[in-house]
Amino acid sequence: MSSKLIAPSLLAADFGNLQRDIEMVNSSEADWFHIDIMDGVFVPNISYGMPVLKAISKHAKKTIDVHLMIVDPDRYIKTFSDLGSDILTVHYEACTHLHRTVQAIKAEGMKAGVALNPHTNINVLEDIINDIDLVLIMSVNPGFGGQSFIENTYNKVKQLKQLIKDKNANVMIEIDGGVTNKNAKQLVDAGADALVAGSYVFKSDNQIETIKDLKALANS
Ligand SMILES: O=C(CO)[C@H](O)[C@H](O)COP(=O)(O)O
């Protein structure tokens, strides 16, 4: 069994002291930096954009996993590659020509992910699952950190795991939203490979220890 990954979401970082939080992730047991880009159109919030990603990527020593919560993401694929993204995830709900978008991400040398909103059924992935590297299951409605985990996520993870098996695909399952020590183990038991955690990590008293505990739980 391969090691389960922890990806702290910089959405919950202290932007007055961003470099300190980046260094904290670098020196922790975290595996990825998870970067949430929101455009105020696809989701009712605006997070941060290119200059901030550039600053993060300059200091980050781990995989940069970018989650685009934006409409028409094709416009920015090359830009995100140039800014250092290793994994670029787009929303199924935001892409008219998803297959073309996935090919464009891969052509830029990045791994391609597809995210699903909580209401979107896993079966929409049937004809794209063999072309992608990662599926991001949203366990909250995208747009804000600090929301409560949606329990139906466990069923979706199991359905996705089955689809991956049926199609003999090589795809990671990532979960984002409301991840804590209360659901980490159950998510991994259902089939998750990577857990994104924002508030639970950055709002804790000892962030390094919180990441370590989450990682231990995910790999227990
Ligand atoms: O992308 C999100 C919302 O759009 C996530 O909720 C965020 O990445 C993680 O935050 P939290 O752990 O506080 O839910």
Image (cartoon, rainbow, N blue to C red):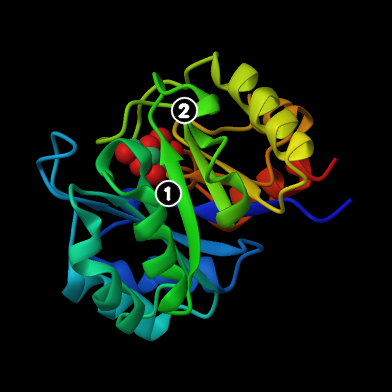
In the displayed structure, does residue 24 sit left or right of residue 189? left
Query: Which residue sits at x=81%, y=45%?
Result: 219
In the rendered image, the residue lying farthest to the left is 40
Count all numbered tags in the image, as a single digit: 2
Q: CA distance from mark 2 to mark 1?
A: 18 Å
* Residue 209 drawn at (x, y percent): 64, 52
Q: Is residue 100 above or below residue 220?
A: below
Q: Is residue 107 visible?
A: yes
* Residue 119 drawn at (x, y percent): 39, 18
In the rendered image, the residue lying farthest to the top is 152
User: Considering the numbered disc 2 on the image, is that residue within a helix, a strand or a loop?
Assistant: loop
Residue denoted by label 1 = 202
Residue type of the residue flagged with mark 1: Phe
| Tag nearer the camera, 2 or 1 | 2
Query: Which residue sits at x=67%, y=44%?
Result: 214
Cβ(mark 2) to ligand 1 < 8 Å? yes
Foreground pick, 123 / 214: 123
Residue denoted by label 2 = 139
Placement of the C terminus among the 4 image quadrants: top right
Foreground pick, 195 / 97: 97
* Res 131 → quadrant: bottom right
User: Quick one: label 1, few (<14), some, or many (20+) residues within 10 Å?
Assistant: many
* Residue 105 drawn at (x, y percent): 40, 68
* Residue 42 drawn at (x, y percent): 17, 39
Residue type of the residue flagged with mark 2: Ser
